[in-house]
Each structure stands twice: as structure tokens, then as C-alpha cells.
């Protein structure tokens, strides 16, 4: 669960940053007619978004999220800045309580070595 959550958070931030870069380049394209940079960053964002989906969907299933939070997590990578907002909300509302519950389970005692 910890690995899933960590991968989700990393991919949310990476996808969000690349999407912001893509938006800035698209706006700059109005003034500087260079489509190559937008095409390259757009392709990179598309590939990263697929990885984001492959990381986020299993996490939503593992957390047993309802349809609306699941859809918001999956679509957050398509709206600039939204990945940061949704990631923070999902982490506080679902991931941290799930990790706390998993960590609160009593561990079996470790047998002491015999001398």
C-alpha cells in the first residue's frame, strides 16, 4: 500500500508539472510559432498520463473509493494544477487513514533467540 501511495504521489506531481509546462508552451506558441516544443512535451505528457492512470487506478481500487473520487483522481491529470489539489485531498482523506489503519494492526511478537 505504501509503495502504491508513493508512486501515485510522484506520478501526480510529475504529470501536473509537465501539464503546466505544456500549457505555458502552448500559450507561448501564439507569439513564437514553434510547434515542435508543444508536440514533444504533449507527447511526453500523454505517455506520463498513461503511467499515472496505471498507478492511480489500482490505488483507487485498493482504497475502495466511490465512483466520484475515483473519476476525480483519474481525470485530474488532464486539468492544469488539478493533480496537486486532488492528490492532497486524496492523501489526507483516504491514504493517510488507510496507512494508519494498516500500521495500527498488532504485529506478532518476535521470538527471542535462545542461548
Image (cartoon, rainbow, N blue to C red):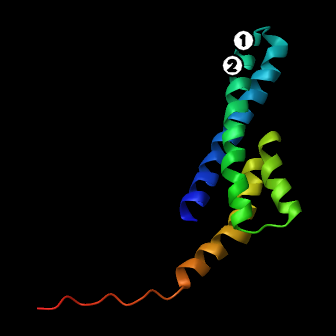
Residue at the spot x=79%, y=67% of the render?
65
Say which residue appears at 24% left-offset and 90% top-offset.
112
The answer to whether residue 41 is seen in the rendering is: yes
Check the image and name the residue furthest to the top: 33
Name the residue tied to disc 1. 36
Element under disc 2: helix
Image location (x, y in percent) of residue 31? 82, 12
Residues 75 and 105: in front is 105
Q: Secondary structure at mark 1?
A: helix
The N terminus sits in image quarter? bottom right
In the image, is 60 to the left or to the right of 3?
right
Residue closer to the observer: 42 or 81: 42
Q: Is residue 95 above or below residue 28?
A: below
- Is 87 situated above or below 113? above
Q: Residue at x 55, y 64 (%)?
A: 2
Question: Residue at label 2?
Answer: 40
Pinpoint residue 3: horizontal percent, then vertical percent. Answer: 54, 59
Badge 1, how many Cα within 10 Å: few under 14, some, many 20+? few
* Residue 80 visible in the displayed image: no
Name the image quarter holding residue 71: bottom right
Q: Are marks 2 and 1 in contact (CB under 8 Å)?
A: yes
Taking the view exactly as shown, the residue that stands out farthest to the left is 115
Amino acid at each position: 500500500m505504501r509503495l502504491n501511495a508513493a508512486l501515485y504521489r510522484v506520478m501526480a506531481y510529475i504529470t501536473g508539472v509537465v501539464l503546466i509546462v505544456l500549457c505555458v508552451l502552448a500559450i507561448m506558441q501564439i507569439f513564437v510559432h514553434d510547434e515542435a516544443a508543444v508536440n514533444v512535451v504533449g507527447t511526453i505528457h500523454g505517455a506520463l498520463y498513461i503511467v499515472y492512470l496505471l498507478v492511480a487506478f489500482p490505488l483507487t481500487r485498493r482504497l475502495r473509493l466511490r465512483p466520484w473520487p475515483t473519476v476525480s483522481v483519474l481525470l485530474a491529470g488532464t486539468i492544469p494544477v488539478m493533480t496537486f489539489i486532488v492528490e492532497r485531498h486524496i492523501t489526507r482523506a483516504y491514504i493517510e487513514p488507510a496507512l494508519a489503519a494498516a500500521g495500527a494492526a498488532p504485529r506478532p511478537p518476535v521470538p527471542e533467540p535462545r542461548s
